[in-house]
Amino acid sequence: MSNHAKNAIEIRGLKRSFWRKTVLDGLDMAVPHGETHVLLGRNGAGKSTLFKVLLGALAPHAGAVSVLGLDPLRQGHLLRARIGYVPTTPDAYRWMTYPDLCRFLAAYYPTWNPGRARDLAEQLDIPQRTSLKSMSRGEGMKAMLAAALASDPELLLLDEPFAGLDPIVREEVLRGVITHLKNERRTVLCTTHDLDVAARIADRVVYLEGGRIVKEAVVEEARPDTLREELVGAAAGVGEER
Amino acid sequence: MKRLTTLFWKEWRDHRAALIALAITAPVLVLAAFLAFDDHLIQDAERTEPSVLFLPFLVLMVVIAVGSELFAGESRRDTLSFLSRMPDGLGRPLLAKMLFYVAASLGAVLYGCLVLLLVHALYGHTGAVWTAIGSNYHGWQVYALVAIAGGVWITLVSCWVPRGGGAILGGALLLGFVALPLFLLHRMEKHFMPTKPEVISLGIAATVTALIALYMSFGIGRRHGRGVWSSAWRGLAVVGALMLGTTAFGLERVHDIRTLSMDEPDFTIYNASALKGGRWLLVSVGEFKGPGRIWAVDLQTGDHQQVGPTGATTMASTYSRLGQVWFHEKVDGRRVRISTWFDAATGKVIKTLPWNVPSPEIDWIIEAEARDRTIVRLGERRAWTGRPPKNLIGNVAGGYVVEDESGKPKRRAMPGQVTGTYPWGWSASGNSNKVLYTVDPFTYTVRKQMPVDEAGRPLYGRAVAAKDPTRLLVQARSALYWVDMETVKAEQHRIKGVSRINSPYPIADRRVVLGGMRNGKAVRLIVDPNTGDAEIAKHPYHRAGIRMPDGRLFTFNFKKRRNEIYDERTGEATPLKGVDMIWPIGFTIEGSRFLACRGKKIVRYDMDTGEMETVWPR
């Protein structure tokens, strides 16, 4: 069995710059099928850029990227149909209600499951007649999460979906994610600044700094404080090296 | 197909607020335009036209509202990342956007027509709408082209700016940028004027180019997270290619305009006039698409020289027989008609004078042929044909000229240009629609009013002819009227079974031919203007042609595509021998022979034998 088959995401020597600023600098990373990896890192560490590369929305300047055995750049149309993506903020059309959003996405995703979309809406208590414009940020994020899960994606990319949510809503969204991760061994790559989130959902935590992975940790038991110590230490080490 | 439908639905949801607002406003605008022109003196069609103008306005509004927001709206709402995350990428959304743009524009046209019909149906003028639309058929083509090309360019620029409003200005600037080489070429060569097919081709090219640039900008330029600059540079590269193409084409056209050779395949002699003395011909030549030139051809030596600049023309044979050539030029910021005179006695160009710029230099006066005299006054130079005049009328800007027997001209000012001078003298003239004048052809006095019909409506008409100074037969409002010259009141003169009477022109015996409709078919009427008696003409009278010495008429029967010699008295038309179509040159008839234009040649044709010999070029 090839590496592509073993790992849902396989990245080797990935480089990407914007003008003179190098955001990803020879990144190597592998996410096996069915695992949840959490990407930690400071603002500007390259987390969102990495997601764009994985979605085929951004061309790498060097390196090789394989997602679900496909090249995101050349086979993006096939790949995106198998990926669920939840952005930092709801970025769908603001006039869309949750059913509108589902109607739009159903046309695109062959694996779209209307029953699952309804169930998720009920579970997450998503308003049906309210447009995204009128929804609270938490409701909007839940709608985006449900919409991403309803297509039954093989890979779920979560781009800081918990950022800026008040604690109660954050907990609701988090539980929604955790519930679905437990039930279905889906491959998940999630970025967050929140160590508590990382500790609760991650199989492995990866710390990104200067466009490279500087620390990886397997999360056997959820211990945010331990994780914090490890990662702070790793970040300090990077600082000293520089 | 499902994805395209969904994207189309998405576009409708994006733009429905603006479209619904326009749909609600439209009937109000039409009603306002219609009511604003509610005047019993104005005919239905005239009243309808301003409201019909609403149609292109509505389409333009829709084009701007939709076109400027198709892409800029995505940027402004920050939804491009959502759209580009979909499995298809940006190609299908681009297609859906363009389809929606076309559908919205067509929908605006159909909805606009519906609104116009409904509003006018309230007043019982539905037919006038179709008339107004039909009368502006060529205008609609231009409107459609402007709407499509302009809208696509606005849409293109909206890919590069975050605000739709900026796209409108940017689109206009970019189109101006593309048009700049053409403008400069026109400055270089004033006869560089695109023909209608060229304008249409340019419009299509501009639209197609904008669509390609749109794909390069949006479909490719925004791929892989590229930003506005990537989008703009790719689009501008295509725009630059269009600009280079049009510039190269324009330069080629300018070169064509500046060179004319008889050896060129589409060199043509359009018409010719024989100057007095019979030695010189003023020949109108040119290429099919190029501007015309007037050549003075010496029939003795076979040489030719150009009279006036490129683009000059000759008009009525009366003027060209005296060697007058017209062209247009800018004088004091105004575009005016200039006349150049070729002196047949010396073989030289003698004078160039403004045509309609009031000046002591141009108190020259020409009366129509029907008075059997032609008088030209050029400063100290005077020439005339036929009998010396008792009085003269000339078409001069701002007035007319009367000359008494002593030859002293008297200029009489009128607020407005004298227009529509007609053989036998009576003319209608005016300054816009507000101040109306008539000139009495017998007394040369001016009446500061127009003839009015029984309902008090003014008649814009042309007197067809009259010997009786107390009344004139006038063609106006698709009918004939008797106008009492004392009261200036008109009464309709009906001809049984004939309607839509139009286009009078004189024929022999001071009678006049008019167009009309009888039983749904076009007919020609021969009317005696003194009695009003009318008969249906047997000859189609497509063009009067030239009068033969024996009174017969050399005519063109375009239905049968041949020349005919027509006797108006007997109604007999005889086809010409040995040739289908030639264009005779006036004042060159000698017995049965005359000079004529035929393709690239001037020929001498003998009507009796059908023989033809080439006179020029030698």
Image (spheres, grey):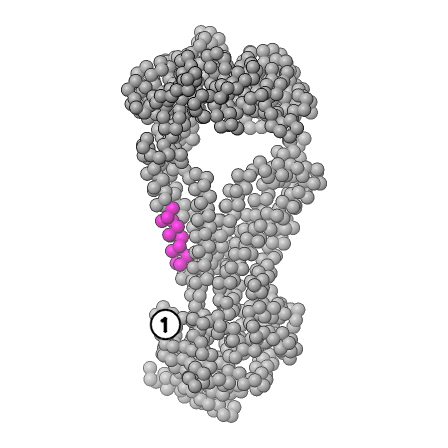
| Camera-side residue of B29 and B484 | B484
Q: Residue at x 58, y 11 (%)?
A: B467
**Residue B234 magenta:** yes
Q: Residue at x 46, y 71 (%)?
A: A76
Tell me, yes or no, if residue B65 can be seen here: no
Residue B605's quadrant in the figure? top left
The type of residue carrying mark 1 is His
**Residue A103 magenta:** no
Instruction: Give the total of numbered labels.
Output: 1
Residue bearing the label numbered 1: A61
Rendered location of residue B369, percent (x, y): 48, 15
| Camera-side residue of A194 and B241 | B241
Stretch of the chain drawn in magenta? B233-246
User: Which quarter of the rendering shows the N terminus of chain B?
Assistant: bottom right
User: Which quarter of the rendering shows the C terminus of chain B?
Assistant: top left
Secondary structure under tag 1 reads: loop
Residue A65's quadrant in the figure? bottom left
Q: How packed is label 1: few (under 14 Cα within 10 Å), some, or many (20 or more)?
A: few
Q: Residue at x 44, y 73 (%)?
A: A72
Above or below: residue A22 compared with residue B174: below
Q: Residue at x 40, y 34 (%)?
A: B288
Rendered location of residue A8, percent (x, y): 46, 81
Q: Residue furthest bottom?
A: A221
As drawn, is B142 to the left or to the right of B489? Answer: left
Rendered location of residue A102, percent (x, y): 60, 70
**Magenta residues, dominant SS class:** helix
| Camera-side residue of B45 and B509 | B509
